[in-house]
Image (cartoon, rainbow, N blue to C red):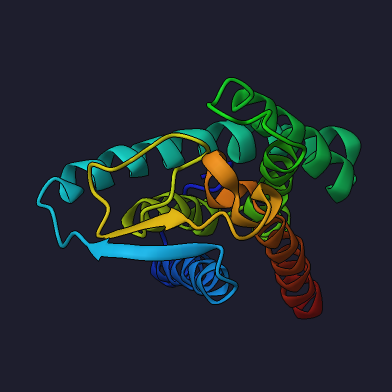
Amino acid sequence: MSIGLSIKDKANEMLIGLAFALAFIGGLFAILWLLGAISVTGFVGFKPGVFIVSMMLFLAAFDEELIFRGYILNNMMDSSKNRWIALAGSSALFALMHAGNPSVWSNWVPMTELFAAGFILGISYTFTKNLWFPTFFHFGWNFFQGLLGFEISGINVDSWKMISHENTGNVPDVISGGSFGIEGSVITLSCTIICTYLIYKYYNDQQ
């Protein structure tokens, strides 16, 4: 409970985390499609294996949030007493954990986006000390990426996608994301920064 695992009255935060992830990833898909960066090649349909995948993705998201927000960010906040220093430190470690992923060094965007992702996942925690919003947002972020046919941090996930699409080659990789997937796009990076600010503003205004 001291690191954010109290389940009392947390159902709304879980649902909001999922809804936010769906809106975020779905919005990025729509933007890239409208820009001509990707083209839809088919609809695969529902696969029963998605249930097993969901459990695996949730456990992975829960594990990472427990480590990087519940433990590392929590302790850095206690040590530094500064929200932004703590977020920067935990986000750097979060990005470095993915440093071996396929295509992560293809250009400057993927690692920068992974660093920024640590902020959007952690900013609410600096106010609430609640892990459920970032956990379900993290889970939804990965789940909906795969469902819409994107690589997850450079890793191909054809096993449960419902929509097939491909990069058209009409825009540079820094816009389409290239082989790293949507997390390699400057559009995703820009949206991550903007949404981090909006989450910060929301909680800051509540104080």
Q: Is residue 14 visible?
A: no
Residue plotted at (59% across, 28% down) = 98
Give residue 68's quadrant in the image: top right
Looking at the picture, does residue 99 appear above or below residue 18?
above
- Where residue 32 appears, as percent x and y from the top left, is 56, 67
Residue plotted at (23% across, 42% down) = 159
- Using the image as rendered, state which of residue 13 and residue 120 is in the foreground: 120
Q: Is residue 165 visible?
A: yes
- Using the image as rendered, state which of residue 15 and residue 103 is in the foreground: 103
Looking at the picture, does residue 57 appear above or below residue 134?
above
The quadrant the C terminus occupies is bottom right
Q: Is residue 110 left or right of residue 160?
A: right
- Where residue 165 appears, as percent x and y from the top left, is 37, 58
- Where residue 24 appears, as percent x and y from the top left, is 54, 68
- Outermost residue, top direction? 100
Residue plotted at (24% across, 59% down) = 162
Give residue 193's quadrant in the image: bottom right
- Using the image as rendered, state which of residue 40 and residue 120 is in the foreground: 40
Q: How many marks?
A: 0
Residue plotted at (60% across, 72% down) = 35
Q: Is residue 205 left or right of residue 165?
A: right
- Where residue 113 appears, as percent x and y from the top left, is 70, 46
- Outermost residue, left direction? 48
